[in-house]
Image (tube, rainbow, N blue to C red):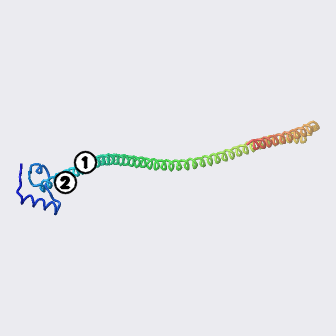
Amino acid sequence: MIKLDKNSENNLIKLFESKTIGLEGNIIKLIESDNDLFKDYLKKCTDKDKDSRRKRLEITKKIQLQNNELSDLNEENQKMMEDLQLTLKEAEEQKTQIEKQNGELMDWREENEKIQQELQKEMIKSEQSRIQSETAKTNALNDLDILQKRNQTELISNIVKVALYIIIGVGIVTTGVYVFTLIMGKDTQVISATWSNIFGILLTNAFSIVGTIMGIKYATENKQ
């Protein structure tokens, strides 16, 4: 045990009374004194030390509680940061995917526009080819019609010429026979009647041929 002298005890008591500073800790339990004032001082120091210890314990518990809360909050914040980073990562991946899809859409759009342009060019070429084909068809039909008309005209002309040649030839022969009969002084009654009948038949046949040819030509033109 520790025992202080009278002067030390009085100094400690004065220090406590003037500045409220006293002994603390387990050392109080080791000090003995016969002075009632110093005993009362030791009791006040003990009570004050207990109160200080209690307050420090409460502060320590409060600090520990706050530390636990801060730790939980830190863990929660850490989790939130991890979730935020994961969300940012997913957003970045989605952004990259969207940009990739946009790039693919732009490529598809450019390719589609290119195909449309080529299709329009092919349609223009096809339309031009169709017009050229129709023009060629029209020209061919016109040429064919002209050729048919020319052939018909030539055929009719040839038929008319042959018919006229025959009619003229028969007329000349018949007339020659009739003139020869007159010169020879023969009876011309029979030959005269024959000559008239032949000329009538020839003229009738000539007009019939010409009419038939004209009717065929007219019917052919209407059919075309």
Residue drawn at the location 50% of the way across and 48% of the way down: 118
Compute the Cα span from label 1 to label 2.
19 Å
Q: Amino acid at mark 2?
A: Lys
Q: Secondary structure at mark 1?
A: helix
Earlier-in-chain disc, 1 versus 2: 2
| Closer mark to the observer between disc 1 and disc 2 | 2
Indicate the position of residue 15 as horizontal and vertical percent values: 13, 61
Q: How many marks?
A: 2
Front residue (pair 60, 134): 60
Q: Residue furthest bottom?
A: 18
Q: Secondary structure at mark 2?
A: helix
How many neighbours does mark 2 have within 10 angstroms: few (below 14), some (14-19), or many (20 or more)? some
Left or right of residue 49, residue 135 in this image: right
Question: Is residue 199 positioned above or below 59 on the image?
Answer: above
Residue 96 is labelled as none
Left or right of residue 113, residue 56 in this image: left
Front residue (pair 186, 127): 127
Q: Quadrant of residue 37?
A: bottom left
Residue drawn at the location 7% of the way across and 59% of the way down: 8
Indicate the position of residue 14 as horizontal and vertical percent values: 13, 62
Q: Are marks 1 and 2 in contact (CB under 8 Å)?
A: no
Q: Amino acid at mark 1?
A: Lys
Front residue (pair 63, 151): 63
Q: According to the image, label 2 marks what residue?
A: 48
Indicate the position of residue 148 as horizontal and vertical percent values: 70, 43
Quadrant in which the C terminus is drawn: top right
Residue drawn at the location 19% of the way across and 50% of the way down: 50
Left or right of residue 55, residue 194 in this image: right
Question: Is residue 210 positioned above or below 31 on the image?
Answer: above
Residue 61 is labelled as 1
